[in-house]
Amino acid sequence: MNNRTGPKDVRSVIDRVEHAGEDGRVAIADVMDEIGTGAFGPLLLVPALILVSPLSGIPGMPSIGSLLISLIAIQIVLRRKSLWLPAFLRNRTVSKERLDNAMAYLHKPARLIDRVTHRRLVFLVGWPFRIVPALISSVMVLFAPAFEMVPFSVSVAAAAVSLFGLAMVTEDGLLVLIGLAFIGAAIYLCWMALS
C-alpha cells in the first residue's frame, strides 16, 4: 500500500500496525507498508503512540522513536510525497508479541479518542500551518537524551506528537493546540529536573 491518506482514525492505525510483520518480528518497514508510505499523519502517529505505550520502557526505544518522529516530521515540512528512512531504521524490528501487547494497551483509549475527534479548525493541519507541529516534532530528537533521564517526560512529549499526528489523521486542528500545551509541559518537566 502506498497511499497518501492512510487510516482516518486511531483504531484503524492500530489495526494496521497489528497486521504488520510476520514470523514473530515486526520491522519498521512492515508498518510503513501496512499504513502507506505517503500517509505522513498516521506514520507520525505510530512512533508517538509506541512511546506512550509500555514499549517506551525498552532501553533505547525513546531515542529510536524520537529519531523516527524527527525524520518523518522533517519530510512533512519538505512536502515529500512518500517517506524515506535509512535502512538501519527501516530494518529495525521488535517482537510481534510485544508490539501487539502495546497496541492492545492502546485500544481502549483509541475508542474514546475516535469518539471525541472530528473535523474542526482544519486550517491548523493544512499548509502552511502544518509546518509548526512538524517542526516542533522534528526538534524532539535533540531532547531525546534529556527525555530518557527525566521520568515520564518522553511520554508527555510523545503525547504531544501523538496529538499532532492524530490532528493530521482526523483533520482536527484543536489537537494541534492541545499538543502545543503538552510540548510546553515536557519542556517544563525537563527544565525543572535538570536545573
Image (cartoon, helix red, strand yellow):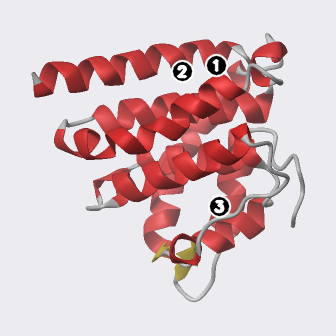
| Residue 65 percent across, percent down from the top left | 45, 53
| Residue 42 percent across, percent down from the top left | 71, 46
**Mark 3 is on which residue type?**
Val
The reply to whether residue 63 is in sight is: yes
Instruction: Judge by depth and name the residue closer to the eye, 52 or 168.
Output: 168
Instruction: Judge by depth and name the residue closer to the eye, 12 or 71.
Output: 71
Query: What residue is disc 2 on?
Result: 179
Residue 13 against residue 195 in the figure, above or below = below
| Residue 98 percent across, percent down from the top left | 43, 67
Question: Which mark lies nearer to you, 1 or 3?
Answer: 1
Among all residues in the image, which is located at the extreme bottom? 23
In the rendered image, the quadrant that contains the N terminus is bottom right
Residues at marks 1 and 2 touching, judged by CB atoms closer than 8 Å: yes
Q: Residue at x 78, y 30 (%)?
A: 170
Query: What residue is disc 3 on?
Result: 17
Kindly report the distance in space between the C-alpha atoms of the residues bearing marks 1 and 2: 6 Å
**Mark 1 is on which residue type?**
Leu
Q: How many residues crowd around disc 2 within 10 Å: few (fewer than 14), some, or many (20 or more)?
A: many
**Mark 2 is on which residue type?**
Gly
Query: What residue is disc 1 on?
Result: 175
